[in-house]
Amino acid sequence: MKEVIVHPLPSLTTEIHDIPIPAPADNEIVIKVVVAGCNVKDWLHITAQNISLNSGDDIAGVVHSMGISVQKTGEFRVGDRVAAFHRMLTPGGAYAEYAVAPAHTAFIIPEHISFEAATISLVSLTAAISLFRRQRLPPPWDPLPAGAGPLPVVVYGASSAVGAFAIKLARLSNIHPIIAICGGSRDVVDDLLDVSRGDRIVDYRQGVHAMKAAVKDALGGLEARHALDAISAKGTWVPLAQMLYASAASGPFHVSVVSGANRYDDEDIPSSVEFLYTYVGTGHYGAYKPSMPKQPVDKDAVKMDVEFAFVFYRYLARLLARGDFRGHPFEVIPGGLAGVEEGLNKLKKGEARGVKYVYRVSE
């Protein structure tokens, strides 16, 4: 089979080579890839570590084979249409004709959903772990009661894939109002919000002071103690923390961040604001790496992220089948595996605005 190896330095390039079709471990499935999704981490992580490998993690395709333990459960069959989240920085990635994923981070794609469902796996779990595990907000299968009062959440980078999925999941959990901070891709966000419940869009391009004032106005006097920074770059978390602090008489306040490259210890951050780094790999391993910032104190709770991932993906499959959930807007990069280099370089340049890049491997 053909596989793409991504070389991050001195400039990002790729090479395609031939390797045997992988064999699954006991708890894994091998997927004949139809569509592979593309994420910022696909170039960022390997650049930071200066390593070359098949860095794709978002898979959609057809089950080719299964490990013994997976066969015993009867959950998947050869030929099933599935999407999956591959273990990051390990062999068997998505940029190949066949890829490998743990069975617990795979889910059935209904017949009416296209294989561009490859936009869903990694970023939806990132959003879910941020909101429901790290911040302990109610999950969609146990939402806030209909008569519950407001529970504001602020999402910075709302038109990004992580931000958009966070909004979708918050709405399923009956969490409102959602204050969605975004820029030129606000059309992606407009359809996701419920203005009748107080959801609002704030444009960050008006400047930090105006943005803070707009968030305060959108809250209408409500106290906001929960936020997700779906960008987590160039200090975006600082004004977000300050907004929460200014909205309420007392904390604690919780801000989820998605980049492990920062320390989140800036002097301008109020002491009552707790930062929580979301390492989506806890859905595979149930643990953070020692060097990662802002880890939860409760390590036993983190171990349960593996079980959470299992439940979350099965619930997601149910939502997709019912038509209550959908993927992110996407742009197909032409050329199949030969297009991976172009797509990653476009992503590295920040050209993906309100879309996720995907590759149709058969091309």
Image: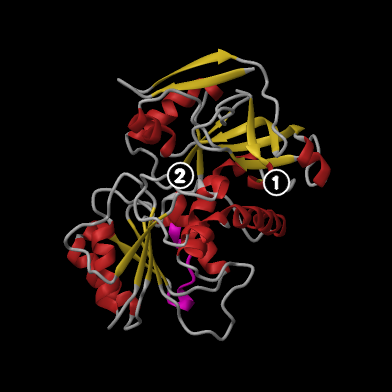
Q: Considering only vertical position in the picture, is 249 above or below 75? A: below
* Residue of label 2: 355
Left or right: residue 84 versus residue 293 is: right
Q: Which residue is painted at 60% across and 17% down in the image?
A: 2
Q: Is residue 81 visible?
A: yes
- Which amino acid lies under the numbered mark 2 shown in the image of this protein? Val
**Label annotation for residue 293:** none
Q: Residue at x 47, y 56 (%)?
A: 164
For label 1, the SS is loop
Asked whether residue 120 is in view, the answer is no
Q: Is residue 214 left or right of residue 12?
A: left
Using the image, determine if residue 326 lies above or below residue 224: above
Mark 1 residue crowding within 10 angstroms, few (<14) / some (14–19) / many (20+):
many
Quadrant holding the N terminus: top right
In the rendered structure, which segment of residues is drawn in magenta?
189-198
Horizontal and vertical percent for residue 227? 38, 65
Give the spatial CA distance, label 1 vs label 2: 20 Å
Residue visible at 54% across and 50% down in the picture = 286
- Residue designated by label 1: 109
Say what amino acid the circle numbered 1 marks.
Ile
**Which image quadrant is residue 341 in?**
top left
